[in-house]
Image (cartoon, rainbow, N blue to C red):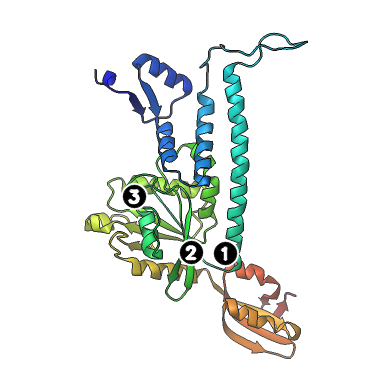
Amino acid sequence: MLIHKCWTCVVNHQLTGVQTRNLEQEIGIHILDRNQLILDIFAQRAQTYEGKLQVELAQMLDQLPRMVGAWQGSLSRLGGGIGTRGPGETALEIDRRRIHERVKQIRKKLDTVRKNRHQHRQRRKRTETPHFAMIGYTNSGKSTLLNKLTKSDVFVKDQVFATLDPTTRKVHLPDTGLAVITDTVGFVRNLPPQLIEAFKATLEESGEADILLYVVDVASEQLTRHMEVIDDVLCEFQWNNKPIIYVFNKVDQASIEKQVRVDRKPRALVSALKGQGLDRLRRLMSDAIKSLYKPVELFFTKEQEHLIYELGRESLISRTESGTTGTICVANLSPAQISRWNQYLVTKSKHLIVFKL
């Protein structure tokens, strides 16, 4: 009796088009499965041009397999003109073709957005700005944490998927100076594959980051389950080889027992809402940046010694040794810097020093 007083029934599973149609005929009300509900929420949250494109693409990809036998062969378009035989496209086939065409258009537009985002990342790499990306379950407090660390005013609300579009802000850290943090879309259990496909451009921001901030709602009763979801995403996208800082958020709402039940390091216990523990988090972020740098030796000939000044502008030179043919410098370089200065690196082999020129 309760069902007949409702207009919509939400099923916490993915349904096929046939299953949805059969249930609607049997129950007599509109059926919404888990994927459709998540996509509807995303559609309401999307604000930017890119976000709207991504959600539309996900909806199109979700709708295609559901279009089965809806028209039952009716409204077919008869072939007109000389040499045509039999009926042409059915209305269902026309709709499918239009969706495929629209999917191609959206993907082309998203490719343009992806190229623009790639250019921004390349510019950050050229300036050697350390890049952090926040990942975590939806509604774990990532946007609030971003606002506190960077003194910005990113949209924050106590709801799932409040943030869809990647937001990057500058942060100043002790000892290491300027860095950037990117807040990305939150994850959820059994995330629809259509969303993963549509949001690849957004997820690339996390994949290109130097260090990940793994944000967890420590007060949640589903803490272990949420971390399993994030761990699965890390493995799926092969991000688990990146340096990770575990940020256990909302400690002001969690008991001591909850705070100590997960022992992952390095970690910071914080309350983004009240600003607790942020100093320790900043120190951990600085330490993580320092760990990316390695001491290497570089050799510059007499004709190349003017490059030492350029090297000193972007790195810390700890020692120099002048010789008759040139100068050896010992400097702390990041992986990107090592790649750029590779031709000047010194390779040691017992008593012989070979210069890469």
Residue at the right extreme of this rendering? 82
Residue visible at 59% across and 33% down in the picture: 102
Indicate whether 259 appears above or below 195. Answer: below
* Side of 251 relative to 55 (left or right): left
Q: Position of residue 123 (x, y in %)?
A: 60, 63
Q: Quadrant of the C terminus?
A: bottom right
Give, as a three-letter code, the residue at label 1: Arg
Residue identifier under label 2: 180
The residue most toward the top is: 86
Q: What residue sits 62% from the left and 48% below the top?
A: 112
Looking at the rendering, which quadrant does residue 101 occupy?
Answer: top right
For the residue pair 255 and 351, the one nearer the viewer reads as 255
The answer to whether the residues at label 2 and label 1 have Cβ atoms under 8 Å apart is yes
* Along the line of sight, the residue nearer the viewer: 242 or 247: 247
**Of the residues tagged 2 and 3, which is closer to the observer?**
3
Can see residue 254?
A: no
- Disc assigned to residue 124: 1
The mark that comes first in sequence, 2 or 3, is 3
| Residue 178 higher or lower than 274, as above or below | below
Amino acid type indicated by mark 3: Lys
Q: Which residue is at 53% across, 26% downward?
A: 65
Residue 163 disc label:
none
- Could you say which quadrant of the image residue 324 lies in? bottom right
Query: Which residue matches tag 3?
Result: 157
